[in-house]
Image (tube, grey):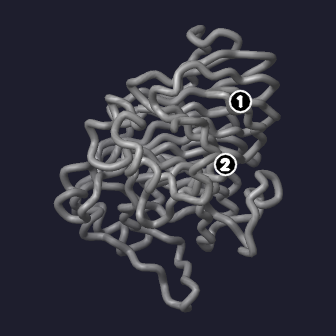
Amino acid sequence: MKYPMKLVAPLKDYLWGGTRLKEEFGKKTQLEQVAESWELSCHKDGKSVIANGAAAGKTLAAWLAAAGEDALGTKAAKASGFPLLIKLIDAHDNLSVQVHPDDAYALRVEGEHGKTEMWYVVDAAPGAELLYGFQHEITKEEFRRRIAEHTLLDVVRHVPARKGDAFFIPAGTLHAIGKGLLICEIQQSSNSTYRVYDYGRVGADGKPRALHVEKALDVTSLSPAAQGALRTPQIDIFAGVRARLLAACPYFTVYHLAAAGECALDAGADSFHALTVLGGQLKLCAAGEALSLQKGETVFLPAGLGRYVLRGDGELILSKV
C-alpha cells in the first residue's frame, strides 16, 4: 500500500558538528553533538526508518525492495539502487576540504555511484563562507605540493554564503562547508569522500584524520569553478505555493517551496517526492492519511501516489528525480 511515510533519520556525530539539529530541528538522541541528519537514506551507512502506518519500524530500503520499482518511479527505476540521499548538516566548525568522484571512477574504485550534490543554505552566521573550486587553474603537481605544504587554502575560491543561497557541486569539484552554516544537502546516494585538508585536527583516537590525496588527485577538476550561488527566480508551476527551482540535473530535481494556506501537488508515476520541512507547521493529506509536519521532519511519497495537499504555513524542500 502506498501512503505518505514520515521518516526517522540516522544521525552522525562527526567532530565538526553542533547542537542545532537537536535544539532547533527536534532530533532525539543521546549524542552530545549532531553533525548530520540523514533525512532520506537507503545507503548502507545509515538507513531511514518509516515512522507511521502499516510499514512503521521498517527501513525505507526494505519497504522499497518489497514494493517494487513503480514506488520509485520510471525515472528512478533506471538507476541501480535508490538514487538520492538528503541530509541536514550543522557545521559548528569547518568541514574538511574534500572532493567526490564521478560515477565512472566511484563504481570502478569504490563499488558505488559517484556524488554530485547541491546545497541549500538554511541558515548562515554573519561572515559565513564555503570553499568552492579553485581561483585559477593549477597543475596536478601544484595541487599535490600545496596539500603537502598546507597552503591549499591560498588558491581555493572562498564564497560568501547567505540564508537562501543554493549551490550546485558537480562531482570533481573541490569544496568545503564553512563553520556557521546550516545546510540542506541533496546528493546522489553515495558516501565516497576524498579528504585533502583537515585543519590539522585529530579524531577520537587522537590521531590526525586520514587524507585521501592520491584518489583526490585522480578525480579533482583543476580548472576554476564556473559558478557561485544560484539565486534562481520564483516560478509559477505549483498552485498555491511560491516556488524556486534550485537544481535540475540527471540525478535530482530540487525545489524550495514557501507554503501559505493550501496547495495541491502530485506525485506522479515518473518519480517519488521527498518533502523536508525547514520551518513552520503543515498538514499533509494524501491517500486517506493526514500527517502533521513540522521543522526538521521529512516525508517520503511513493511515485504514483497521486494528488496530495499541504495546508498551513511552512518552508520546505521538495526533492525528486
Between discs 2 and 1, the one toward the N terminus? 2
Comparing 244 with 225, the one in front is 244
| Above or below: residue 303 compared with residue 197 | above
Q: Residue at x 36, y 65 (%)?
A: 194
Horizontal and vertical percent position of residue 166: 56, 34
| Vertical side of 21 occupied by 229: above or below | above
Task: Label 2: state its secondary structure.
Answer: loop
Q: Amino acid at mark 2?
A: Asn
Q: Position of residue 302 (x, y in %)?
A: 49, 35
Say left or right for 220 vs 58: left
Amino acid at the residue labelled 1: Leu
Residue 137 horizontal side relative to residue 310, left or right: left
* Residue shown at 39% from the left, 67% from the top: 196
- Name the residue that disc number 2 marks: 52
Task: Mark 2 and mark 1 in contact? Answer it, CB < 8 Å.
Answer: no
Which residue has dot 1 on it?
Answer: 284
What secondary structure is found at the residue carrying circle 1? strand
Q: Identify which residue, 288 or 241, lies in the foreground.
A: 288
